[in-house]
Amino acid sequence: MRHLLALALLSGSPVLAQPQTLNRAVQAPAGALTLDCAGRSVTVAGGGNTLSLQGVCDFVNVTGSGNVITLEGARALQFLGNDNRVTWTKRPRYVFTNARTTGNTAEQAR
C-alpha cells in the first residue's frame, strides 16, 4: 500500500515577502523524513508517515491521518486529520483541534 506525504514549508516572513514553498511526496515504508523548518510554517498531508521537524517551526498544520511527527517546537500546532501522534521537545504555544477529528495525540517527548 502506498502512502503519500505532502509538505508545504512557507517562510515566516511578513506578508510582503514572497513565500518559499517546498512540496515533497514519499512512499512508506521509506516514509521517514527529517526537515529543518525553523521559523517556517509546515502543512503535513498524507498518511502513515514518520516525520521529524527540527528547529522551532512557526505553524504546524496536520491535515493527514495516521502520521507520527516528532517536533522540536512550534508557535502553533493544529490538527485537521485523524489518528495523528505528535511529540514535542518544546511545547507549542497554541494547540488547536477540530471538533470533527478523532484519535489525535500531542504530548511532551519522554
Image: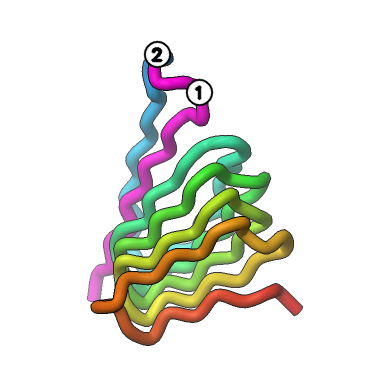
Q: Position of residue 14 (x, y in %)?
A: 47, 21
Location of residue 101 (image quadrant): bottom left
**Image vertical order of residue 36 relative to residue 15, above or below:** below
Q: Residue at x 47, y 53 (%)?
A: 60
Give the residue type at disc 1.
Answer: Ser
Residue 33 seen: yes
Residue at the far bottom: name it. Answer: 103
Numbered label attached to residue 39: none
Predominant SS of the magenta segment: loop
Image: magenta residue range: 1-16
68 relative to 43 in the view: left or right: right
Q: Position of residue 21 (x, y in %)?
A: 37, 31
> What is the quadrant of the C terminus in the image?
bottom right
Q: Are marks 1 and 2 in contact (CB under 8 Å)?
A: yes
**Image vertical order of residue 33 relative to residue 110, above or below:** above
> Which residue is the site of mark 1?
13
Q: Residue at x 64, y 49 (%)?
A: 54
> Which residue is the site of mark 2?
16
In magenta stretch: residue 92: no
Q: Position of residue 85 (x, y in %)?
A: 49, 76
Classify 10 Å Cα crowding around label 2: few (below 14), some (14-19), many (20 and above).
few
